[in-house]
């Protein structure tokens, strides 16, 4: 026992487990990463007792993974945000989700294609807000959504020369270049409907920039390399060549940052682009602020 404890003192896994090993602590971090920052929001999302939530938040604050930020002074009320150390845990949360989706909730198959589990979670985004999130892109750092008007946000697995050799054999992985080209060619129609188009993948910004230049992609390609958007929306992912990648998803988000339409799985890419355009056209007839 003494030897084991001595080893644990220098074991990163053991030290991380001391912070993250509790069920509720992990779920609290999950919800903060999703954009729920206030105590009442966290309690409602987690269906957790106030006593347990207070204890877990205190534990995470004490370990400097979460910090308090006051938003009200009389009486004092705090929001809870991830610290830099907390943001460093976001890939851990996404990796846990990806592992469980494949090995516990799935049959162990490596696939970029859709699943019923992913579909339920993705469809559940309809009516949910997209939290403000700034990511690097091919057009400089920017919010994942346009400043005004609706945004078509399409997540895709990856493009370019950095793809693993077995990429064509992974179901659902192929087709990202086609998807980008189709959105590029349809961009005037999206613009006429008042919508912006943003693509997002977990590739590095330099990889995306090389692809955008080669393919003359006029809209921003966002880099979710740190998996912040993946965690915020719990996007479906798969791991290829030890890199977490998005499965193909299309979201139509209105000017109030609310998801109004989801397309998943995306099997027929041309049809999915037309479906997104139709969804944007419907939003054009909806007054801003309409539920």
Image: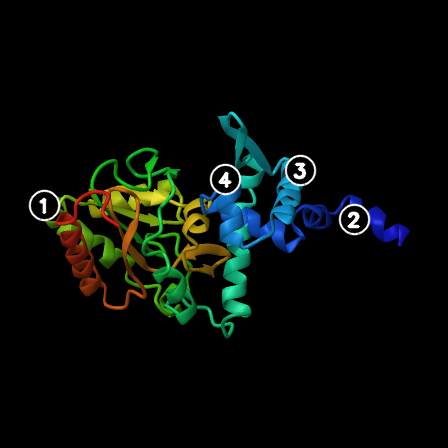
Mark 2 and mark 3 in contact? Answer it, CB < 8 Å.
no
Q: Earlier in the sequence, mark 2 or mark 4?
A: 2
Q: Earlier in the sequence, mark 1 or mark 4?
A: 4
Which residue lies under the disc numbered 1? 192
The reply, left or right, for residue 140 in relation to residue 215 is right
Q: Position of residue 238 (x, y in %)?
A: 45, 61
Q: Earlier in the sequence, mark 2 or mark 3?
A: 2
Q: Distance from label 2 to label 4 (Cα)? A: 34 Å
Of residues 68 and 236, the one drawn nearer to the viewer in this rendering: 68
The reply, left or right, for residue 186 in relation to residue 74 is left
Up/down of 119 relative to 176, above or below:
below
Which residue lies under the disc numbered 4? 38
* Disc 4 packing (10 Å; few <14; some 14–19; many ≥20): some
Disc 2, SS: helix
Which residue lies under the disc numbered 2? 8
Q: Distance from label 4 to label 3 (Cα)? A: 19 Å
Q: Quadrant of the N terminus?
A: bottom right
Of residues 166 and 257, the one drawn nearer to the viewer in this rendering: 257
For the point 12% across and 47% down, the residue is 193
Q: Position of residue 175 (x, y in %)?
A: 28, 62
Disc 1, SS: helix
């Amino acid at each position: 026992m003494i030897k084991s404890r001595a080893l644990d003192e220098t074991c990163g896994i053991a030290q991380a487990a001391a912070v993250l090993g509790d069920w509720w602590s992990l779920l609290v971090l999950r919800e903060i990463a999703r954009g729920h920052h206030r105590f009442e929001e966290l309690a409602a999302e987690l269906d957790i007792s106030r006593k347990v939530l207070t204890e877990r938040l205190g534990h995470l604050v004490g370990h400097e993974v979460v910090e308090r930020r006051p938003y009200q002074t009389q009486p004092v009320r705090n929001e809870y945000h991830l610290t830099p150390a907390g943001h460093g845990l976001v890939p851990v949360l996404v990796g846990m989700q990806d592992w469980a989706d494949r090995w516990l909730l799935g049959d162990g198959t490596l696939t970029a294609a859709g699943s019923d589990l992913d579909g339920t979670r993705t469809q559940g985004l309809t009516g949910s807000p997209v939290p403000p999130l700034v990511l690097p892109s091919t057009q400089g750092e920017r919010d994942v959504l346009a400043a005004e008007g609706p945004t078509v946000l399409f997540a895709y697995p990856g493009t370019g020369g950095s793809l693993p050799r077995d990429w064509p054999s992974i179901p659902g992985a192929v087709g990202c270049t086609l998807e980008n080209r189709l959105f590029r060619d349809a961009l005037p129609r999206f613009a006429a409907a008042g919508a912006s188009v943003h693509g997002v993948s977990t590739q590095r910004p330099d990889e995306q920039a090389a692809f955008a230049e080669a393919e003359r992609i006029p809209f921003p390609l966002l880099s979710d390399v740190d998996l912040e958007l993946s965690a915020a929306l719990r996007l479906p992912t798969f791991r290829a060549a030890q890199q977490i990648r998005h499965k193909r998803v299309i979201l139509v988000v209105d000017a109030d940052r609310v998801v109004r339409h989801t397309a998943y799985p995306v099997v027929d890419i041309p049809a999915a682009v037309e479906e997104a355009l139709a969804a944007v056209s419907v939003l054009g007839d909806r007054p801003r602020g309409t539920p």
